[in-house]
Each structure stands twice: as structure tokens, then as C-alpha cells.
Amino acid sequence: MPQARDGEGRRRVPRVKVSVPGPPPGLVSRPRLLALLDHARDTAATLVCAPAGFGKTCLLADWARRTGSAATAWVSLDVDDNDDRRFWTAVLEAFGRCPAVPGHSVLRSAVVPERSGAAPGFLADVGNALDELPVPVWLVLDDVQELTDPRPLRELATLLRQQPSGLRLVLSSRYDPPLPLARLRLQDQLTEVRAHDLRFSPEETGALLAAEDVHLDSGQRRRLAEQTEGWPAGLRLAVMSLRDAEDPDRFLAGFAENDRAMAEYLVTEVLSRLPGSLRDFARTISVCEEVSAGLANALSGGTEAGLRLDLFERRYSLAVRAGPGRRWYRLHPLLRAHLLADLRRRTPDEARRLHGAASDWFAENGKPVPALVHATRAYSAGRLTTLLGHHAVELVLTGEHEPLRRALAVLGDERIERSDLLALVTALLWLEHGDLGSAQRYLDYVDGSRGLEPLRGLVRSRQAQLRGDPGGILRASEQLARPRGPGLDALALLHRGTALLVAGQAKTAEAQVRAALGAARANGQLYVVTQCLTVLASVAAAKGDHRALGRLAEDADERNVAHGWEDTVPGVTACVLRAYDALLRAEPRECLYHAGRAERLVPARAASGEPGLCVLTQTLAGAGAFELGERAEGLRRMGEARVASADEGLPAAQVALCAVLEQRAALQLGWTEAARDVLLWCEDALSGHGELALLRARAQLALGRCDAARQALRPLLDGEVAPAVPWSAVEARLVETSLGLHEGDRGRARRALAGALTLAESMAVPFPLVSADPAVIELLTAQLGRLGAAERFAARVLATRAALLSPVPASALLTERERGVLRLLPTLRSFEEIAEDLTVSPNTVKTHVRAIYAKLGVRRRRDAVEAAAERGLLDPQWRVHADGG
């Protein structure tokens, strides 16, 4: 091999080209990937392959610095390296700068011939010199995709086949280079790091956000992850913009379409590297979230979509396979969002045409939901009318309410008014969200066209449910079932079961609803399935099967959340049932959480439909607050719910539940007038029900009239009247226990308490015992060790009560930084001035303020100061400053 002469050879290679790049600002080290590279020490080659922006260079440079650059030779390739002499000059220069290469090595002194490929001995000498190295050297070739000339690629392939013992080759490329990697893979001599490995994990995303002092809540983090899919460049660009974003939610909503830095990166680093025909193809298919080869051909008007999609996945890693059989492809979300925004901005007519073509393809292939979605985006009234005519009822039953709403909004009221079908479907959607008034407005347009009887029956049944009219539900469900529409048999059974439940026939109702559940599952009607689970949870509550209540309500609620049905009547009902279940389990915090969810969903329903939901929601929220120590506030909320329901004619079970909870709280606080008002409110509604006896007995006991209390309670204890709410029987035995203690008959009190324990355990409702009077709890504590089979349940009751009576101090709700910000909120300083005082960024202050508001349950600065003073987090004098005094 020729030796270098003075003034020629490799010394002209720029130092930056053969040096390990320095760390970028805010580098997030990735130990799991560094470990993966460390494990590659025993393989001949390592391939790090992913599209632009996946952090290949950063990862390899970080790894080289951490493992010690003494054994690393680095070459950053560019288009000039397609000259094979330039390429090998840079490689030998990198070896020459590597301390692990001895001074006498040929690698330090050799000169590259004019054409290395024409000098077979050159590669042999390089291979031999590598074999003679005392320790293996890592040769990192970054941006191998820049090599397109056959000569350097052929020579590099020759070196790979030789596998010199002193060489560990690391290739970084945007797509698989044309090198003999398959042979190395078969020989288990190739380590591969692909795009899926390089995506940021949730923990790494959190580290990046923390490093940039960006604070997002869990929902915002989830949206960021969904948009970027862990793409490092996308994450970094988003985080850089989030540092200055006043509203993270608004920024994340339009990040891919509107962020200039992201757009520039996608254009210069991703799209500009694609052939023009592929760029156009990508823009065309961007109208769909996922495409198959057939759909892509329909959109592009060609026949080679399958090959192009395969290129996007295999060569460019810009698409992933998805769906059954992995026959569908999905472009990276950020890339698709950019392409679609560009398409709509530059050629809106073409975007609508493509949406129309997608709608036609989906309709022809039996996929009505995406067909409707794309017809809506095409603003095609003709397509929408046809699709709704064939599939509207089916989509209501499967829960595709949002696509239906958007389609009807595009059609507009003028077209809806002229179609009985569209008017009925629109009314039904309003009814599913509990709005009787808006539904009636569209029902007024219906003139009685024939052929729509099943749909009309469905609407009437739903109206009757919202009004609490069991007879109306039964009559409408009969019409719903004869003649049967598509898949309406399950709904007819469900509505009949609902009517029976409202009428107080829980066991018969359960049989009907279980039959409906089976039919709905067989028909694939997911929304009806969820409705059935919700009604079955209500049946379980009516029967006193509280274990089933919790299980069914949780199942229904999770389905509602997953499918976006939370704000429907069944969705809100599931929230209320979960709050009720949590209260009975003596978990008031969980009760308050689910009641709060329901409250956010039902504010407009009191005047239109399902008033009982509003009453129950507010009562349960008040009961939860009461048990958590906010006693006056909790009782006030229960009282407001009662007053608001005065003219609603609620079912007896709902009246009983509200009355039992509010009267108990009022008597514990000594608010006798409120307790009296409860009794007056419910006397007519609870006539013939055991709760009336319970309430009267409590009232007499509070006045010290034990004989009158016992006489009032006797019909319930003797079974002459049944409670509307099964666990009221536990409350009755606790009143009997208190009577025994008042009369000095501890034996009678112990027997009554044992009965209460047994019944509460069988029903899985510790709440009445946990919240019992102190004298009853004292007796229960004294009985420990003599309760037999009830011993474990009694211990659980006492432990739960002790935990509730020892709440976490309010100060523990806030972090130290949040408390520091809170102390400055009563002053007249702006958030920017507070940030300056605390030497943090204004965005950090805003993040802490949002957290303070959430933890204190307020929305304004003044309210936060007030709430903090009440909880002892601030001196009460600060209220004056907050008021501007």
C-alpha cells in the first residue's frame, strides 16, 4: 500500500467530518438504547435505521462519548463521498485520529489510490491492517443513505464480507443500504436498531419535558404522544414551542398543521427526499387516516398503490401496517396532518373530491361509518342523504352519534325539515343526550310518513323514559317491536325492561334486560350493550345486590369513556351509579369524583329530561362532601337538590335515597328544621315504603322520644312495610341500636348492632355503619373479639371510619413550589412579576397556578385565596388583599 507523502492525502478532510458530534442542548440520554448498542460488541456490524429526525446521530454520538471515543472512528457522510477516493480518504483519516489505532499501523500512513476499486490490493491491505489491531475499533458511518454510487458501496460490501476481527462497523441510515446485510443477519452478526426502538418512551418524553421546564397534564401528554408517536424530532419541535405557548391545549390542537418549525422540517428533511410521484401520492392518500391498496388506488386513480405503500413502509419508514391481516397502512400522524392541511389550503376542491371518492369506496365495501365521515368532509348532500337513508338507525344503535351529528349539521335544518327520517334521527340524537325540548322541535316537522314506525316507536319510548313514564315506555316498546326494524329486537326488550324497573318490578325487568343484552351482543350493537349494562346496574341497586352494582356500573362507564358516550343519558347514569356504589362502600372521595363527573355533564338536563339524574348527582356529591368533613357545604347541596326536585314526581327509590341521606346529615349537625323539611317533602312519595317509618323514628329519637321512635320504627323492623332502598334496613337496625343505648338496654343494643353488621356485610354496604353515631361506634369497638363471623367486617368498618376522621392535612395537597406561588397570589403582582420573584419562568408559574386551582376546586385567583384561607393554607388576613382592600 502506498505511503502518504508530505502535502497530500487525508489531511485535507475537515475535522468536523471525522469527529464525534457534540451533544445538542437539552440532550435526553437514553440508557435502554445505549445498553442495546453495548450488547452489539460481539457482532460484526450494527445498523441504526430510521427516517429523518429519529435521533440516530445523537444516539450514536452519546454512546461514543460514554464508551470512550478512544476506540471510535467517526465519519459523517455526504453526497461528495460518492467519489470513492474521497470516501476512503475520510475513512482512513478517521482511523488515523483514533487513539486505539497504533502509530505504526498502515491505517495511519496509507494513501488512497486514484480509484480504489481499480486497485484490488488496497482493500486487502485495509482489511489486513484492521485484523492486526490490538483491540476492535468501531467505525461509525453516519448518513449512509448519502452513498448512491456503486463504487464506494461495492467496496464497503467487500469489507463487510471480509469481517476483519479488528473492525466493528456501525451504519446509520434513513433506509436500508444496498449492502449484504441479509448474510450477516443469518450469521447472527448484525445488530439492528429500528424506528420502533428509537421512538421516545413515556418516561423519555417525561424527561424531555422536565429538561425543558414544560409542564403538561396527563391528557396533554397523551395528545402529544398520539400526535408524535414518539418521533424524537417531532417531540423536540413541539416542546420548544410549548415553552412559549400560553394555552397548551390550543397549541396541541393545531400543532401539526400550524407550527412553522414543524412544517419546515417536514418539507426540507422528509418530503424533499421523496421522488415527486411519491410526494403527490402521499398528499392524495392523506385524506384517510388509514388506506388499503384498493382504497389508495381509488384515490390516486392508479394501479400501483400497493408497491408505493410498501415503499413508504419498508424503504422510508413513513408508514406502518395496521388493521386485520396488516393490509392497511397509516402515514405518520404529523406527516399526514401536514400533507392534509397543505392539500386543503392549496386545493380545497381537490380535497373535497378525494373525500368523496373515499366515501364511495367505503360505501361500496360495506363500511358505512367512514363512508359517512368522508361524505361529511366532502360536503356532499347527495351522498349524505343516501347513506343516512340506509344506515341512520343502525348507526344510532351502534353508538356512532358524533359522525351522525356532523353529517346532519352539514345537511342543515332546511333539508332535515323536509325528511321525516332525518327529523326523527335528529330528535333521537337529542333524546340520547337528555334534551326533550330540542328533540320536540324536530319531531314537529314529522308528518307521519309510512315505513318509519319502528324508528318512531324508538323515539317515543325514549321520550317516555326521560319523563319517567313506565306506561308510555311499554306502549312505545310494543310499537318498536312490531314490525321490527333492523336489529330493533334488542332495543324493544331493553325498553320494556326499563319500564318494568321504573314500575318497581326489578326481577322481571332483569330477565328482559338480560335477553336484550344477549341480542345486542349478537347484533354487534355496542351502544345498546352499554345501555343494557347500565340498566342492569340499576336493577342490581334496586335488588340490593351492591357487588353486582359496582361491577356493572364500572363496566358500562369504561365503555362509555372508551367510545365517547359519557354525555349521553346512559353515560351520565353510569357515572351516578358509580358515585352511589362508592358511597355505599364508604369511599366518599371516589363518590365525590364520579358525582363531579356527572355534574359536569348534566347541568342543562333539569329543565328538559331525566331530572332524577340531576337530583341524584347533587345529592351524592353533597353526601360525599359531608363524609369528607365539608359538612355544612355537603348538607347545603343536598338541600338544594331536594328543593329543585319539588315538582318533579321522582320515583320512590330516588326520593327514599335522597331523604335518608339528607335527614341523617341534618340530624348529625343538629339542623332540626332541615330534618323536618326532609320529612315533609317525602311523606306523600314514600307512603307505604319503609323509609317513611325510618325517617319518623329518627326524628322522634332526635327529640329524645324513645317510645315514639320505637313505635314508628316497628313496621319496618317487623316487615310490614318494605324499604324502597334495600340498605335502609341496615339504617333501621342502627336506629334500633341507638334506642337500646338511650334506654340503657345494652343487650338489646348489641343484638340490634349484630343484625346491622350481618345485613351490611351481606349487602356489601359498610357506609351506614362507618357513618353511625359515636355511641354506636363505641359499642361496636367494645364488642370486638366477640362478633364471631362478623369480626373481620367490623374491623374494616372501624378502620375505614378512623381513616375518614383523620383526613390528609390540606397543606399536603400542595407541593412546596405550589405553596410558594400560593403565598404570592393575594398580592397585586402579575404572574410575570411572581415568576421574577421566584426566579422561574412565567409558564412555570401558570402551571403551578393551574394545579393550585384544580386542587382547591376553584377557577379564579380570588377564589383560590379564599379557599386557601379557609383551609388554613393562608392567614385569613390575606382575604382583604384579595378583595382589593
Image: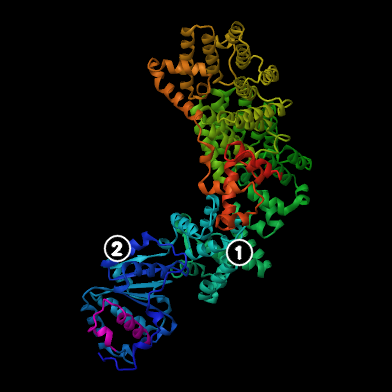
> From this viewpoint, is residue 570 visible?
no
Q: Quadrant of the C terminus?
A: top right
> What type of secondary structure mainly makes up the magenta span?
helix
Q: Is residue 324 magenta?
A: no
Determine which quarter of the picture holds residue 706. top right
Amino acid at dot 2: His
Mark 2 and mark 1: Cα distance apart in space: 40 Å
Residue 272: where, in percent of width, then height? 53, 75
Write down the region rendered in magenta. 85-110
Vertical placement of residue 709 versus 508, above or below: above
User: What residue is rendered at 63% in x and 68% in y?
Assistant: 343
State how many labels appear.
2
| Residue sitting nearer the eye, 171 or 91 | 91
Query: Disc 2 or disc 1, which is closer to the eye?
Result: 2
Vertical placement of residue 140 versus 438, above or below: below
Q: Is residue 95 magenta?
A: yes
Vertical placement of residue 8 versus 73, above or below: below
Q: Secondary structure at mark 2?
A: helix
> From this viewpoint, is residue 707 visible?
yes
Q: Secondary structure at mark 1?
A: helix
Q: Which residue is mark 1?
A: 257
Q: Earlier in the sequence, mark 2 or mark 1?
A: 2
Q: Which residue is mark 2?
A: 39
